[in-house]
Image (cartoon, rainbow, N blue to C red):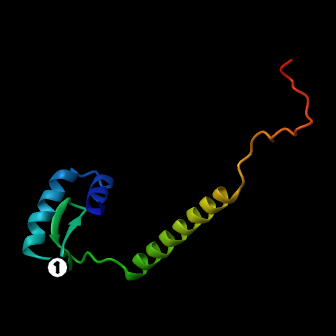
Amino acid sequence: MIPRTLSENAGLKAEEIIAKLYVETEKSKNAGIDVSDGQVKDALVAGILDSLDVKTWAIKLTIDAVLTILRVDQIIMAKPAGGPKPRGDQAPDLDD
């Protein structure tokens, strides 16, 4: 999912990049996409590294978004459904 999105956002042909990435992953587990030239390279050799801080914040913010959605869902489910109130026994019949 991430390599496809990264390729598409960089203006590359995602299908070709994914195919190359599968081939290179068999050779080296460090294969990655260099969006500057659209090639699949060994990430360590090319100096393409991810920041642990970025990944940590991404996970924290994802969890925060999920918790917010669950809270809103809980509020919606807790609210009693509205609708017409039942008429009492002494209420007049309005169909006459």
> Dot 1, crowdedness within 10 Å: few (<14), some or many (≥20)?
few
Quarter of the figure with the C terminus:
top right
Residue ID at (30%, 59%): 6
Q: Quadrant of residue 88?
A: top right
Q: Amino acid at mark 1?
A: Val
In the image: residue 84, left or right of residue 27:
right
Q: Residue furthest front?
A: 89
Residue ID at (92%, 36%): 90
Name the spot of residue 16 as percent of width and height, x first. Answer: 15, 53
**Figure label count:** 1
Name the spot of residue 48 as percent of width and height, x first. Answer: 26, 75
Q: What secondary structure is found at the residue carrying circle 1?
A: helix
Q: Is residue 88 above or below residue 80?
A: above
Residue ID at (22%, 65%): 33
Q: Nearer the viewer, residue 37 or 18?
A: 18
In the image: residue 29, left or right of residue 9:
left
Name the spot of residue 14 as percent of width and height, x first. Answer: 22, 52
Q: Which residue is mark 1?
A: 45
Q: Nearer the viewer, residue 76 or 15?
A: 76
Residue ID at (67%, 60%): 75
Q: Quadrant of residue 64?
A: bottom right
In the image: residue 38, left or right of residue 93:
left
Quarter of the figure with the N terminus:
bottom left
Q: Nearer the viewer, residue 19 or 77?
A: 77
Q: Is residue 80 above or below residue 74?
A: above
